[in-house]
Image: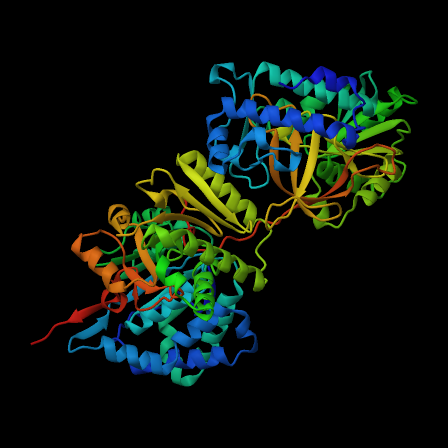
Amino acid sequence: MKYLVGESVSSLVIEPEPIFNNLIIEFISSLSSHLFSIDSISDYPDVVTFAFWCRRSHLLKLKKDSCTSLCRVGRGFAFHIAPSNVPINFAFSLVFSLLSGNVNVVRVSEKNFPQVLIITEALNELLSQPKFFRLRKKIIVVQYPRDEEYTSELSSRADVRIIWGGDKTIQAIRKLPSPTRCVDINFPDRYSISVISADAILSSSRKELLNLYAGFYNDIFLFDQNACSSPHLILWTDNSLSLDRAQNIFWQGFAEFLISKKISPNPLDALERYTSFCRNSILSPTLQLTSSVNDIIYRVSYDQFPVHPEMFKGKLGYFIEAHDPNLSLFKSIVNQKYQTVTYYGVSPVIIKDIVTDYSLLGVDRIVPIGKALDIGLVWDGLDLVSVLSRVLNYS
Amino acid sequence: MTNLDSSLGSSLFNTDKDINTNSFFEKIRDLSVHHYQNCIEYKSIIDSLFIDFSSLSSLNEIPFLPTSLFKEFELMSIKRSDVFKIMTSSGTSGQSVSKIFLDKNNATKQTQALSSIMRTIIGSKRLPMLIIDNSDVVKNRNLFSARGAGILGFSMFGKDHTYALDDKMKIDFKVVNSFAEKYHGQPVFVFGFTFMIWQYFLSELESRPNCFDFPDGILLHGGGWKKLQDQEVSNDDFKSYVRKSTGIRKVFNYYGMVEQTGSLFVECEEGYLHPSCFSDVIIRDPYTLRPLSVNNEGLIQVLSLLPTSYPGHSLLTEDLGLILGDKCCACGIKGKYFKVNGRVPKAEIRGCSDTHSVTR
């Protein structure tokens, strides 16, 4: 086991504290300023986003929102299994749990992501300052090979397990015994969509559209359309008269945005996208390539829309589209897999009301296009501080 | 359906495109229609792409399948009961295996095509054959792999098959020396995989120049340069090492894959690869998959007239290469000539769906 932060898992002292403890807020906000002082930080937009999230004023606002009259205390020892493909999530996972009052061991991927190194170095630097000595016992970041032994040893002591991963990973870890009071917080594979109003596209100014493209780009391409909250399906509202024109404006504009940004994809991206198209053609009959926009975006549609479009995901700029004027298709397809709905020109309240009025089993977030990746204390349908802590009830 | 016999009659590598392109295009298009009619998966893809074969007018428009699709799906254009042989390759990803389904007819075609290509390299007689590998790759069923299949495939062009390496992958000097003595002054056929030859043969012989003497030897090797590129060994380096330690001057690299067995691309004296009358190559922009013109590096699409029992006649590979000219190579062979620059490095796919897994 390699320690990136901390010295020994066995020396952990499990001393949970009340949520939003002042020392923790001090520590996380110092982490924020420390990260911003690093020259190369601008090379890593995800680290910038994290550092921005961790700034003092934001933490104090969160504290105000979270601290009700209830007394909340950390559950104890939180064991995190961070995803191996979104480097920054380990850091969010850690600070969410620190704010909730827990002692933490975070297992990060063995791939040495620069983001992980930058943040763990910053953590070590801060933890060497006397005022933060007390936190050394609460923060351990480790790497170890995919090995059940360590995972099961840590699981056997955990009060909370935070498992980021695909369905298989989660199933495998859940099989490992943990104390009966242990709470598992799973972040499994999810599916996300966008709802766009055709009329809104037609009435948008050029500037508004450029903002939309930039937001749509971030939602999708920062993680190769592979993040749980990146949309794969685009539902278009409004009547069919405006549909074609709005779609053409949007996709052509977005393709031109991509080209003008000179964003260089990986050399296998187009092949991967095409391969996902071929795979889906075989697996889901009636799939049609609507158009290959400038050969960098695939728009596909179905003659007969599949019941489970989430089973036919594309990659790296591959979108299923459907015309859904009354969101009736939306009502019929949403299930537990659906996480985020991003929207443009559609009222989030309408979408929220559909989810509640029609008792849909999925959709946890409804946010404007551009905000798909904005992670926070409420994530994946969970109020994380409340699940990562326990209520100490007294009367 | 394609007529191999007529192809065999024409000059094999002089694929003068001005004259022959049309007939090659038409054959490939007909082959596409054949697969469309006989392979349901291929049909699904073509239908999703809205391609109407009768409206196609050039080779660039022929649809292609990604090679990795043969790892995910069992693609064939024959009845399962007609499967005569299944060829597999592990590729480089290690985990999944490509499966290529051959019926008797397709297997025969592969052999015929390979024979005619080999005739241009070693002549029409079987030659004494030295294989730079160990015999376990072929003998041991558990180890049997694309490597073993390749050796067996080429073995039919040789006789007195002699393996140069022992089971520890060390050069068996006794065996090689006695082979050299026995066939002194005669042409011999030396075969192996590029990396194996480099790692276990040439590297070992580096300190012993003129160790072997095969003045009339012909070395054919293939399998990819990736590992040699990592060690910064060029084709020229490779050839000069071969010459130094074995005296072999005729060294031919080939580019081929299990998905298109039989229609190899073979290197000429100038060091460039040439399609034969069975095959062609198109370079595509990695970012848009549009065809690229001469001298632009991109993904290599390979076309072959041989695959009839599986839809592998037009494939987009993960290899990078470029066409250096399309009229006439300095070696005298007419038509396109190209170079393979290696495989595209697999990028780490970002996202949160595939993460740490626990082995059970």
Identity of the residue drawn at 56% across and 17% down: B103
Q: Closest to the observer: A59 or B300?
A: B300
Q: Closest to the observer: B120 or A102?
A: B120
The quadrant in which the C terminus of chain B is found is top left
Q: Closest to the observer: A53 or A101?
A: A53
Q: Position of residue B14 (x, y in %)?
A: 81, 28
Identity of the residue drawn at 59% across and 40% down: B92
Q: Is residue A201 visible?
A: yes
> Residue pushed farthest bottom?
A131
The answer to whether residue B193 is above or below residue A15 is above
Quadrant of residue A356 within the rendered picture = bottom left
Q: Position of residue B115 (x, y in %)?
A: 74, 19
Q: Is residue A315 left or right of residue A172?
A: right
Q: Position of residue B335 (x, y in %)?
A: 79, 34
Q: Is residue B53 left or right of residue A143?
A: right
> Residue pushed farthest right?
B185
Q: Is residue B223 visible?
A: no
Q: Position of residue B348 (x, y in %)?
A: 53, 53
Identity of the residue drawn at 59% across and 49% down: B288
The quadrant in which the N terminus of chain B is found is top right
Quadrant of residue B219 within the rendered picture = top right
Q: How many marks?
A: 0
Q: Closest to the observer: B108 or B187?
A: B108
The answer to whether residue A34 is above or below residue A270 is below
